[in-house]
Amino acid sequence: MIPAKRNRVEMPRRDPKERSSDFIEVALGLDPEMAISEAERCLNCKHKPCVSGCPVQVPIPEFIQLVVQGEFEAADAKIKEKNSLPAVCGRVCPQESQCEAVCVLAKRGQPIAIGMLERFVADQASAAKKSRDEGAQATKPEKKYPERIAVIGSGPAGLTCGADLAGYGYEVDIFEALHDTGGVLRYGIPEFRLPKSIVDEEVEYVKSLGVNVFTNVAVGLTMDFNEMLRSGKYAAAFIGTGAGLPYFLNIPGENLNGVYSANEFLTRANLMKAYLFPEYDTPIKVGKRVAVVGAGNVAMDAARVSRRLGAEEVYIVYRRSREEMPARLEEIENAEEEGIKFQLLTNPARIVGDEKFRVRAMECVRMELGEPDSSGRRRPVEIPGSLFTLEVDTVVVAVGQGANPLLTTRVDGLELNKWGNIATFDEAGATSIPGVWAGGDIATGASTVISAMGAGKRAALAIHEWLTAKRDNA
Amino acid sequence: MFKVLEKDLLAENIYRMVVEAPLVAEKAKAGNFVIVRVSDVGERIPLTICDNDPERGTLTLIIQAVGKSTRDLVNIPVGDYVKDVLGPLGTATEIKDMGRIIAVMGGIGVAPMLPLLRAYRKKGAEIISILGARTKDLLILQDEVRSLSDEVILVTDDGSEGMKGLVTDPLRQRLESGEHFDMAIAIGPARMMQAASKVTKEFNLPTLVSLNSIMIDGTGMCGGCRVSINGETKFACVDGPDFDGHAVNFDELVVRQGYYRDEEDHVCRTLGEERV
Ligand SMILES: Cc1cc2nc3c(=O)[nH]c(=O)nc-3n(C[C@H](O)[C@H](O)[C@H](O)COP(=O)(O)OP(=O)(O)OC[C@H]3O[C@@H](n4cnc5c(N)ncnc54)[C@H](O)[C@@H]3O)c2cc1C
Ligand SMILES: Cc1cc2nc3c(=O)[nH]c(=O)nc-3n(C[C@H](O)[C@H](O)[C@H](O)COP(=O)(O)OP(=O)(O)OC[C@H]3O[C@@H](n4cnc5c(N)ncnc54)[C@H](O)[C@@H]3O)c2cc1C
Ligand code: SF4
Ligand code: SF4
Ligand code: FES
């Protein structure tokens, strides 16, 4: 097989100048010719190393061979055996550190573009269904069991868990606190990276499996979690409430007007569609010069949203160096292409306001890397006398999210770890309460879409096995 | 979707609406609020639950139409629906045994005060209410306040009814006269709560206020509602909205409330209306 010598396909992307002023998707997607030619590079390895890199074990070589044959819908169905959200994962998975990292061709720096292919087949299948007027319908699985299961949170963990439980044959109710579904897929990740029509389709698909979705229900407040179980209405529950507590820097000036948490900034822009203000009622204020503190996916998203909302200068302010930036490579490149500037080895010390209590500047210090810390990364230390002022009028704090205590503090007997995440006792996410599983960011701390999905899947299987054993013993 | 069952005009631009929301009605307690979204393009706005009827599955909201969202809300006809209602949010007020309470309310602040008066009344508290407004016609819900108070003092800025002056005038008088109170509650515009807290501070009278910072999710997820309490940052939507009035940084609250004024004005202008 000679094709392996060909280079990896490149994702066509919109021109940075053009795209950085609108919210239309940046990546254009592969066309069938490109996709087939990329798929032909795959060696169809017998031992399938790539599969072990995927948290949900997508049958990668199998779906890729279907692409080679031009069987795009069959390829989509193949992926969906393991991953019900391929259109999402193909777009936002950190493939370079997962499936593609362990592809045998990665050694030459040319791994198969698994993510791009996944995205391609999902989009092809969806378009084909639409042209037949089928929408995202699935055949509704038969209700085989009498038990009803509660799923709290409609992020990727909850949606996946709910879909799988419905697939096993249970009645499932998903409860979501916000007015719309999807969790971070809806309120965090911007339209230009993950169009909301795709999230809608995925949610429709889950609903078409017979899953009931209730929005505007904050479990712990609107409904009492303890009562839900005690009353016997629900035989088991899965908690997938995410990492929804914004961290701040705890430096002076953080409550000035013009300082946002990334959660607030992105929720306004994405969930509330403030980029379409005044057509949509929720406002957002982005000045001319924006500093985004942090260098993860969240920070890149906030920076690129700022740019699109008209900011002239956007800085990423990060206390470590480029190598340690946690964001996906692709998104760092995209941000750079769009003119985002990186202030690395830089730590904010104070936000300075004007007489109207509005942000005027941010004082920062320069850092250098010292000895490795507990995470193995070299610890940044302040360079004495390096204080300088960055003139900005908006600051977005994107230094991470913790566990939101809204539900967890209102569940009797639920054990939490020292960070406030739900303590889990096995791979499937069993908690200290029998019949209650947890997974996704609420258990692991902020992680990835696909690992949240994996957690939802494992919990669904564990719930099914637990209920089956209970039924058999009864 | 949440059905509007009743709607009355209480005063110019102030409405009472009864909305069907059975789950919220079952769980609501004094001090809780809801986040409401009128339509698919609407913003999420917080409103106090003024009363709840678990049997009927309804909430009573008192709404002052001040801008686009509140105006859209009060324009929903009876029988139509509010798109989203989330609640009950916030930490419910801890109702302790209290001998005598002086309750100070300004303008629309009377609405969030009612459930507190009801709850303290049930606990046997004696309640002296000071009810203030700019002018006579805006002194809403007088009958309700009377039925829950041992004494009611009316105050208007222009003297068109009751005393002429500000709510802090009779508050100061009563405290200066040496009368004993166990606590004060002050609810209304931020500046009014600030002034009332300043007066009660002089007399070391514990004071509860209810903060109306700008909110989005109302569940502790965005941090947009943050307020400074004794120099510490708290999220009003989950840690409050009730706080110790002597610990609140009101100046910060007021400027933070005004952050989107230009944008809100813009919406109103594009609608050809003035914001009140
Ligand atoms: C801006 C941003 C960009 C990201 N980019 C990427 C990326 O490119 N690639 C990637 O793999 N990962 C990315 N991530 C991380 C990824 O989105 C998360 O790891 C993933 O969404 C976690 O899924 P989850 O289901 O655990 O929780 P979430 O997606 O957080 O969903 C939890 C849901 O539960 C709801 N909820 C919370 N409490 C309650 C309650 N009491 N009752 C009812 N509902 C409740 C919440 O409203 C929310 O909708 C990003 C995260 C952010 C914030
Ligand atoms: C806990 C709480 C309880 C409240 N209870 C009541 C009540 O019972 N009855 C009532 O009439 N009003 C209440 N409010 C105030 C009400 O939420 C605002 O009047 C409303 O959001 C204004 O929206 P608008 O678009 O009509 O006006 P706008 O023109 O948008 O704004 C007018 C002013 O209202 C404030 N505001 C705007 N958007 C928000 C928002 N999303 N959250 C909070 N404040 C905002 C701002 O200070 C703004 O300057 C409460 C607020 C809070 C925080
Ligand atoms: S789900 Fe993510 S990790 Fe798994 S194969 Fe697809 S892109 Fe790779
Ligand atoms: S490791 Fe790479 S080449 Fe081998 S099957 Fe997987 S994707 Fe194809
Ligand atoms: S409104 Fe978002 S945290 Fe309070």
Image (cartoon, rainbow, N blue to C red):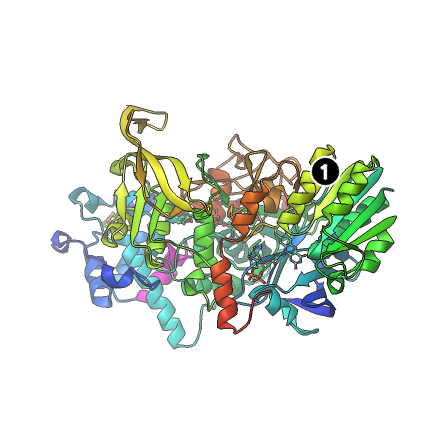
The quarter holding residue B275 reads bottom right
**As displayed, is residue A83 above or below residue A451?**
below
Residue at 46%, 64% in the rendered image: A200
Q: Hey, which residue is sitting farthest top in the picture?
A: A371
Label 1 sits on residue? B200
Residue at 65%, 36% in the rendered image: B246
Q: Which quadrant holds the C terminus of chain B?
A: bottom right
Q: Is residue A206 left or right of residue A150?
A: left
Q: Chain of mark 1?
A: B
The span shown in magenta is A72-89
Q: Which quadrant holds the N terminus of chain B?
A: bottom right
Residue at 11%, 54% in the rendered image: A2
B162, B120: nearer the viewer: B162
Q: Is residue A254 magenta?
A: no
Residue A103 picture location, percent across and down: 24, 46
Residue A369 picture location, percent across and down: 27, 27
Q: Identify the amino acid type marked 1.
A: Thr
